[in-house]
Amino acid sequence: MTASRWRGVSVLVTGGRGFIGSHLVDRLAQQGARVTSLDLCQRWPVPDGADDVRGDLADPEVAGRVIVGQEVVFHLAARLSHRGSMTDPWGDLRDNTMATLALAEAARRQESPPRIIATSTRQIYGRPDRLPVDEDHALRPPDVNGIHKLAAEQYLRLYGHVYGLQAVSLRLTNIYGPRIALHEGDFGVVSALLRRALGGQEMVLHDDGRQVRDFTYVDDVVDALLLAADADALVGQTVNLGCGTAYSLRDLAEAIVAIAPVPCRFQPESAAAAAIAIGDYVSDPSRLIEATGWQPKVTLADGIARTLAWARDGGRA
C-alpha cells in the first residue's frame, strides 16, 4: 500500500494510544493521513500532526463528536483481559459492547458514514474442534469477554444490513511486539513470559508447554488493518487475522531464552484459568489473504528479538 493512498484521508483510531492502535496511528501519520486518536489512557504519545482526543467511546456524546468528518474508522478500543472480564463483567460490557454500539449509532447518523474496521478476538471460537480454525467454526465463547466481543461483531453486522454501514471485523490472535504491556495486568502469555525474562526470573509454562498458539507481530497486524480498509469484498464480513503458523509455548520460551537466558518451569494451570482456557489454537487467515493479498512477514524468532531489543532500550515509543 502506497503512502499516497492515505494522504489527506480523515481517519479515526479508537484506542489510538494503546499497543496496536499507537502503531497504526504512527503509520497513518507517516503516510499523510489526517489522524484522530481517541483513547481514555495516555500510554503512548501520538505523533506530531495527529489530533489527540481523550474520551470514553461508550459515551454517545463523545462518539458523536469524534465521528464527524471521518472517512475511515479503525475501532481498536477494547477491554482485553479474559480473566478480568469474569470478575468485572459490567466494565467489560461497557468497554467492548456498549462502546461499539455507540460508534455504530454515531456512524450511521452521518451523511456519509465512514467505513469501520474493527478488531475482535479468536476467543469467540472457544475450544477448537479442529485446527486451523476458519470462520465457519462453531462459536462458543468461553468467557464474558468473548461474549461481549461477539455481540460487538453482531451490532456491526446488523447495522450493515439495516442501515448500509460498511464494516469489517477482524478476529485477532496473540499479538506481540514493541509497546506490548509488560508491567501491568493480564495481557496474555507473551507479555507474561517476557516480563519474567526481563526481570531475570524463571518463566512459568502451564502443563507441558506443548500447547500451540498463533503469534502475530504487531507490524504485520497494522499491514492487515490498512489492507482490509480497502477490501470491498470484506465489507459486512468477519475474518481471521493471524499468521496461520502453529507455535508451541515451548517454541515461544525458546525464542526468549535464546536472547534472555532464564530457567523455565512447568506447572499445572490454575482452576480459574483452566475454566476459560481454549487449548490449542491456530488461525486460518485464508479469507483475509484472498481478499487483500496480506502475508505476515515477521517470524517468531525475529519478532521476539525486536521486542526484547525495544524493552532493553527502555521500552520507549
Image: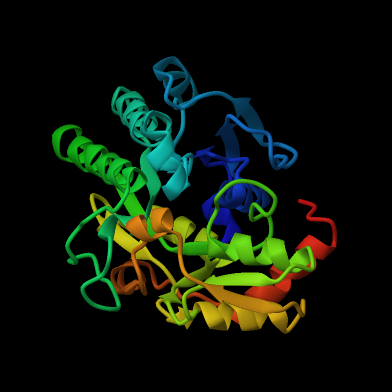
Q: Is residue 124 visible?
A: yes
Residue 89 screen position, x and y as percent: 37, 34
Residue 85 screen position, x and y as percent: 41, 41
Residue 317 screen position, x and y as percent: 76, 51
Q: Is residue 299 visible?
A: no
Q: Is residue 13 above or below residue 133?
A: above
Between residue 247 and residue 225, name the one nearer to us: 247
Between residue 22 and residue 310, name the one nearer to us: 310
Structure colour scheme: rainbow
Residue drawn at (61%, 25%) of the image: 54
Image-based side of 280 in relation to 258, left or right: left
Residue drawn at (71%, 80%) of the image: 257
Image-based side of 303 in relation to 83, left or right: right
Q: Is residue 316 above or below residue 130?
A: above
Q: Is residue 287 above or below residue 106?
A: below
- Rendered image quadrant of residue 311: bottom right
Residue drawn at (45%, 65%) of the image: 269
Q: Residue furthest top?
A: 61
Q: Residue furthest right?
A: 313
Residue drawn at (32%, 74%) of the image: 284
Between residue 155 and residue 236, name the one nearer to us: 155
